[in-house]
Image: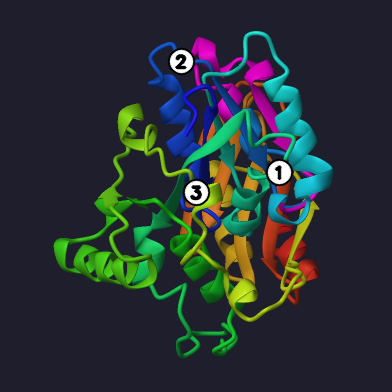
Amino acid sequence: MSQSRIPATIVTGFLGAGKTTLIRNLIAGAGGRRIAVIVNEFGDMGFDGGLLGDCGDADCRPDSIVELTNGCICCTVADEFLPTMEALLARDPAPDHIVVETSGLALPQPLVRAFAWPTVKHRVTVDGVVAVVDAAAVDDGRFAPQAPQGDAPARDHDDPIEELFEDQLRCADLVVVSKADLLDAAALDRVDAIVRREARDGTPSIHGSPKGLPADVLLGLASGAEADMVGRESHHERAGEEDHDHDDFVSVVVEPPAFASMDVLRERIGAALSVPGVLRVKGRARIAGKPAAVVVQGVGPRVETYFDPAEGSDRLVVIGLSDFDTAAVSARLAG
């Protein structure tokens, strides 16, 4: 492997797993390395790139972060990803390392293969694919068929969420189990067993930390994955299907009214998340009478919020299965 090629790390993981937080901490602890970041969002509203650009570190400058919001990067490799990569490689000085954060609904396999394209393969190589796994979500059974609870719909054995989770793990060179601090030892053992079962044999895993992981743990894996795809194949590839799409998922953007209080905001976000088929709510909202916006991160039963004085669009993006009731979500957010 040529040492002149720029290493690239692909960070994959399902919606809300903690990819942006992992990368934010990675940039802040990069030790002077020039790291360029490509952030891919599902849908037409960018959000995570702004969180990275406001990490409080000089290396989080806006020109080091590129945001792609025209769909999942695994479906727009030729039109979106490759031109972006070529533009980064043309910079002087070039980045020391490139990090690609995929959408939570993206397959990493097509992206890894893109690094073998003639326009980039002599300049950049995949250092490693890092899959971030939400420990609490795995232990709750959100990535495997199970009996429905409450008004949740039954899930079948061709579950797109389960397949995506398995495909992301199968492609990984390193698995980071995030939010491990939310589980007791027995539950964490169950999650670790699921990770070992779904990942390729010998793939190392590590428990994440709210303080982040040292850069040297995530960088320098030297996998050269673009030339080593055996065993990483997705469900679609193993079934001999050429195309992959995201017809199973949809996103909508909602502009909610100002909420009366933080408690009301959390209650209504939780109500929106409880609509059958809704997987994720994130973005920015307002509390009446407060000058700063509130950053909202909701997944499953968890809703995280904090005030953020930075400028930005006060909108929420709601992501879910293609048949979720968008009118019900808007109604619950509006109260």
Q: CA distance from mark 3 to mark 2?
A: 22 Å
Which residue does the numbered mark 3 point to in the structure image?
Answer: 225
Q: Dividing the picture into quarters, in which one does residue 194 lie?
A: bottom left
- Distance (Cα) linking label 1 and label 2: 26 Å
Residue that label 1 marks: 117
Pick the front one: 230 or 273? 230
**Would residue 47 be visible to someone looking at this image?**
yes
The location of residue 201, given as percent across then percent down, is 31, 66
**SS state under label 1:** loop
Q: From where the camera sits, is residue 314 visible?
A: no
- Tell me which segment is drawn in magenta: 51-72
Q: Which mark is residue 33?
A: 2
In the displayed structure, does residue 56 sit left or right of residue 189?
right
Picture coordinates of residue 274, whole percent (x, y): 58, 70
144 magenta-colored:
no
Q: Is 65 within the magenta? A: yes
Mark toward the start of the polypeptide (3 vs 2): 2
x then y, percent, for residue 19: 49, 44
Q: Is residue 92 left or right of residue 140?
A: right
Say what secondary structure mark 2 lies in: loop
For residue 212, above or below residue 159: above
Residue at figure coordinates x 47%, y 73% from the top left: 143
Which is nearer the N-term, disc 3 or disc 1? 1
The kind of residue on which mark 2 rests is Arg
